[in-house]
Amino acid sequence: MDPNEIIDYLEKKAEQFLGHQIGGKRCQFFVIDNPYDLGEFEDALRNTVRVPAMLVEGEDGVISGNQSANNTDTLNFSFMILDKRKGRESIRDVRNRCKVWGVEVVTQIRKERISGIVANKVVTFELNCPYSPVGPINVDYFGYHFSIQFIVPITF
């Protein structure tokens, strides 16, 4: 399966839960192609971000034979939900808000796992999602990082 199909799906979740406008000038959804390039990350936050924002990275995975005739491709993705601290707002309040949005995204993915993730493809999504707090990023941004997996059958 093409990882871009999952990225497109996640962008729709940013639209649904964060108010992201696909094709809009100021985005709330970013794909971090190289998480080790902090310039790419900072550029997304400084120049074009509208908060809350979802930043997605990933595309690594595992091919498995599952010790049967059913081969699968497990695609690993992670996303961060970030928001900007307003004035003297507590960091905990910002993070809690981001966690709520992230949990909404993850539970919606679970609901859509059989037929709604990628059209005409069965994508398995098991709800086993580690998460951890992030921030400060660029001084005022805080949130949560979520790790998710999408499992698709491989057909030859």
Image: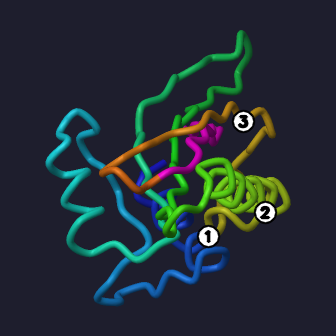
Query: Residue 13, percent across and down?
Result: 61, 70
Between 89 and 25, the one nearer to me in the picture: 89
Horizontal and vertical percent position of residue 156: 52, 37
> Whole-percent x and y of residue 52?
52, 69
Q: Earlier in the sequence, mark 3 or mark 2?
A: 2
Residue 143 image point, x, y percent: 56, 50
Q: Main secondary structure of the magenta part?
A: strand
The answer for how far apart the CA atoms under marks 1 and 2 are is: 8 Å
Q: CA distance from mark 3 to mark 1?
A: 16 Å
For label 1, the residue is 13
Quick one: label 3, few (<14), some, or many (20+) residues within 10 Å?
Answer: few
Assign a secondary structure to mark 3.
loop
Q: Residue at x 43, y 85 (%)?
A: 22
Crowd tier of the residue under label 2, counting other residues whose Cα lies within 10 Å: few below 14, some 14–19, many 20 or above: some
Specify the segment rendered in magenta.
142-156
Counting residues from the start of the chain, the first of labels 1 and 2 encountered is: 1
**Depth check, front residue: 122 or 145:** 145
